[in-house]
Amino acid sequence: GIVGLWSLAILALERYLVVCRPLGDFRFQHRHATSGCAFTWGWSLLWTTPPLLGWSSYVPEGLRTSCGPNWYTGGSNNSSYILALFVTCFVMPLSLILFSYANLLLTLRAAAAQQQESDRTQQAEREVTRMVVVMVVAFLTCWLPYATFALVVATNKDIVIQPALASLPSYFSKTATVYNPIIYV
């Protein structure tokens, strides 16, 4: 979940740093990969531990085939955790992905323009653009239903959702484990 979301964001940031070079001549090294992995796992631990310590809780979701944060019970304790989780584990990685890939595309477009739009650079630009669109659409397909569901249920306590329907967003998010290796490898 959170590790997967942030791994995609860190990967996008690393691509941005290598291609766009906002820090100068950045060379991606093993220590950068290690730092990225350590960050994603540390961040995930930071945001999955609070329900175990009393800030919200974990409950069975939908058809009770998996557990997730408690968006069903009202109260500021649960609502504040869901909102914090939404911002730090969906909005922030999505923003980083959009920022990184938008700048990457702008940089490639500028480089292609300097090379007077040869067929080769145009084709490379189209391929990168297609790849970025696929990555962002896959991310949103997997995670937007889950994030939207969480926010809707957490902010509308009177809403009644059938268990089978409540399970769908969770299943969508779990499909990321299938799509990501296909897209990113």
Image (cartoon, rainbow, N blue to C red):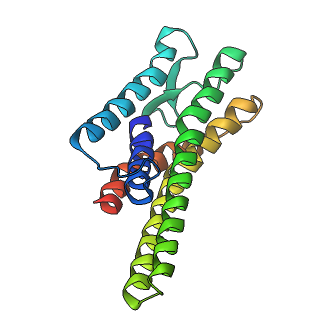
**Is 81 placed above or below 94 here?**
above
Asked whether, in this view, residue 98 is left or right of residue 182, the answer is right
**Is 127 placed above or below 87 here?**
below
Quadrant of the rendered structure where residue 127 is? bottom left
* Location of the C terminus (image quadrant): bottom left
Q: Position of residue 133 (x, y in %)?
A: 50, 67
Residue occupying the point 35% across, 62% down = 183
Q: Residue furthest bottom?
A: 119
Res. 72 in view: yes
Count the labels in the image. Answer: 0
Residue occupying the point 25% across, 37% down = 31
* 44 or 102: nearer the viewer: 102
Res. 175 in view: no
* 3 or 109: nearer the viewer: 109
Residue occupying the point 53% across, 46% down = 96
Quadrant of the rendered structure where residue 184 is? bottom left
Q: Position of residue 3 (x, y in %)?
A: 39, 36
Q: Position of residue 76 (x, y in %)?
A: 71, 16
* 26 or 67: nearer the viewer: 26
Q: Residue furthest left?
A: 30
Q: Residue furthest top?
A: 53
**Is 55 placed above or below 98 here?**
above
Q: Position of residue 48 (x, y in %)?
A: 46, 23
* 15 or 155: nearer the viewer: 15
Residue occupying the point 38% across, 43% down = 7
* Location of the N terminus (image quadrant): top left
